[in-house]
């Protein structure tokens, strides 16, 4: 394996007098500019910026980019996050001048193309999910969750009901309890049964008149489809409880089944997972929400309406939960998702899920002899393994993740779901080839062998990365994010 590559800070490449730009002399006197600004906003001395040439800048940031793990360069099997390849056609469409240069405050008359795309995308997502209406406004899955729960709250209030609790299985995504709490509800956790699905007995015990919603991820975070989901939604509706589907794992059921047909009242979509818009790096994300007709009056404002050949923004919605954020959503993500759906078509979207499920089950079968499988039976788009066996040799899930970096693979999710000891959550997605999956499985099998014969090799990993193991607790509590000359002299 190649040795680690180190890259100096841009400040350490600085040399006095070097510049990376060539600009004409300013025709505005500096003193005149300063006179326009409050004194407290004017620097007393120039900032201590690095002095580097254009070539220094280009080479520095190009080298840094080559140290990154990403879907364009590495297999990225991050369970629950669906880090699949983003087709470059989507990027081209998002960069069309009519989309990329359109100001969000432009009047409707000159924004008809963008409004029409939003209207059509909402209709496509509604059809995919079996819903009656969709809001594109939420900027991430978690904000989509909050939006859905707020609409449920508004629905119950409009009916004169005061419900205070939301039921959430222990196999749910971690953002679910946070979203419900932020909306003012008490979160009640339900148990999973021996098969990794919702314990219907525990659900029945908690279904009281004070329950507003049941919030569940399908497939769940163990990578399993809830086989009794229709029975679950019927139990909830019998008690007046709204049923919310966390659609983060929609990548497993596209074109196969629809949340609306299963009895769900609300679901959100992660465009940055299922529909190949960029994911990671802090954003931008996109988490549209689909609802059944009885919740449609509560959608966030504005809603795009189409009459004849003209699209408008509908602000007159007296029951709406209001506006979630500035403007209409992360529009570039909407363009990418729209392009992807139109490119794939109905048959293509179904093939996405079928191949994602096939790839995950292939990995699970190849690794089941060397790692414990978290739940019995076939999985959906992701499989959850356990490193319990390796832990007996002093090797943890985190150790396995670090060792994978030396093989050129990004690590799967570790320690999630929380109900699985030493969890390794692996999602290959549908975009990876069998050759890549085999290379990954070979690496995982070798690590399992090393855990038995030479665990020190794993404990020393990674050895090929620019930075070895960090003190993660200290990094979180005492982040060192700023370079100053005095700190390095």
Image (cartoon, grey):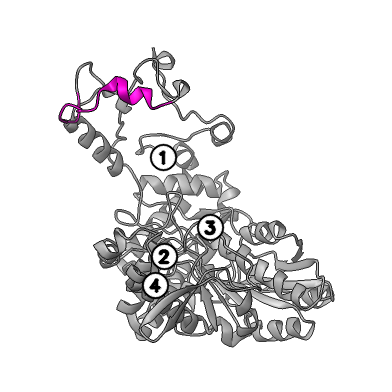
Which of pointers 2 and 3 indicates the residue nearer the eye?
A: 3
Residue 379 lies within the magenta run: no
Residue wearing tag 2? 428
For marks 1 and 2 on the same chain, the one whose residue lies earlier in the sequence: 2
The alpha-carbon separation of the residues under discs 4 and 1 comes to 49 Å
Residue 35 lies within the magenta run: yes
**Viewer-side residue, 255 vs 30:** 30
Residue wearing tag 3? 325
Q: Position of residue 262 (x, y in %)?
A: 60, 85
The alpha-carbon separation of the residues under discs 2 and 3 comes to 33 Å
Residue wearing tag 4? 115
The alpha-carbon separation of the residues under discs 4 and 2 comes to 35 Å
**Viewer-side residue, 355 vs 454:** 355
For marks 2 and 3 on the same chain, the one whose residue lies earlier in the sequence: 3
For marks 3 and 1 on the same chain, the one whose residue lies earlier in the sequence: 3
Q: In this orientation, does residue 274 appear?
A: yes
Identify the magenta region. 19-37
Q: How packed is label 1: few (under 14 Cα within 10 Å), some, or many (20 or more)?
A: many
Q: Position of residue 250 (x, y in %)?
A: 50, 73
Q: Are marks 4 and 3 in contact (CB under 8 Å)?
A: no
Q: Position of residue 364 (x, y in %)?
A: 48, 68
Q: Please, what secondary structure does the residue beneath circle 1 have?
A: loop
Q: How packed is label 3: few (under 14 Cα within 10 Å), some, or many (20 or more)?
A: few
**Viewer-side residue, 406 vs 127:** 127
Q: Please, what secondary structure does the residue beneath circle 4 have?
A: helix
């Amino acid at each position: 394996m190649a040795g680690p590559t180190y890259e100096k800070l841009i400040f350490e490449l600085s040399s006095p007098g070097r510049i990376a730009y060539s600009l004409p002399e300013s025709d505005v006197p500096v003193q005149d500019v300063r006179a326009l600004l409050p004194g407290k906003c004017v620097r007393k001395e120039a900032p201590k910026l690095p002095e580097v040439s254009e070539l220094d800048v280009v080479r520095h940031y190009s080298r840094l980019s080559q140290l990154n793990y990403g879907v364009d360069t590495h297999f990225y099997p991050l369970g629950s996050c669906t880090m699949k390849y983003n087709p470059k056609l989507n990027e081209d469409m998002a960069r069309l001048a009519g989309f990329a240069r359109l100001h969000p405050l432009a009047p409707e008359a000159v924004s008809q193309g963008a409004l029409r795309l939003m209207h059509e995308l909402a209709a496509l997502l509604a059809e995919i999910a079996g819903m009656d209406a969709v809001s594109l406004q939420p900027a991430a899955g978690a904000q989509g969750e909050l939006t859905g729960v707020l609409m449920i709250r508004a629905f119950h209030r409009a009916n004169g009901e005061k419900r205070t609790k939301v039921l959430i299985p222990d196999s749910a995504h971690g953002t679910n309890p946070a979203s419900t709490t932020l909306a003012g509800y008490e979160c009640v956790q339900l148990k999973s049964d021996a098969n990794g699905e919702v314990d219907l007995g525990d659900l029945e015990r908690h279904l009281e008149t004070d329950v507003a919603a049941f919030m569940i991820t399908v497939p769940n975070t163990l990578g399993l489809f809830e086989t009794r989901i229709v029975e679950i939604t019927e139990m909830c509706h019998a008690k007046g409880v709204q049923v919310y589907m966390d659609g983060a794992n929609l990548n497993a059921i596209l074109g196969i089944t629809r949340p609306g047909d299963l009895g769900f009242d609300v679901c959100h979509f992660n465009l940055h997972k299922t529909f190949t818009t960029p994911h990671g790096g802090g954003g931008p994300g996109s988490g549209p929400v689909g609802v059944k007709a009885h919740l449609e009056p509560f959608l966030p404002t504005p809603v795009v309406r189409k009459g004849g050949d003209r699209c408008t923004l509908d602000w007159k919605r007296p029951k709406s939960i209001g506006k979630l954020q500035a403007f209409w959503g992360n529009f570039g993500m909407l363009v990418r998702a729209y392009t992807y759906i139109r490119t794939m078509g109905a048959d293509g979207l179904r093939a996405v899920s079928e191949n994602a499920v096939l790839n995950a089950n292939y990995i699970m079968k190849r690794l089941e002899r060397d790692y414990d499988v978290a739940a019995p039976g076939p999985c959906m788009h992701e499989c959850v393994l356990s490193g319990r066996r390796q832990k007996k040799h002093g090797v943890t899930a985190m150790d396995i993740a670090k060792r994978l970096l030396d093989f050129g693979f990004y690590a799967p999710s570790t320690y999630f779901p929380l109900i699985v000891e030493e969890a390794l959550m692996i999602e290959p997605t549908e975009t990876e080839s069998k050759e890549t999956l085999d290379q990954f499985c070979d690496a995982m099998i070798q690590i399992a062998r090393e855990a038995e014969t030479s665990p020190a090799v794993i404990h020393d990993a990674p050895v090929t990365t620019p930075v070895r193991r960090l003190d993660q607790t200290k990094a979180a509590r005492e982040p060192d994010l700023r370079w100053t000359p005095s700190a390095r002299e």
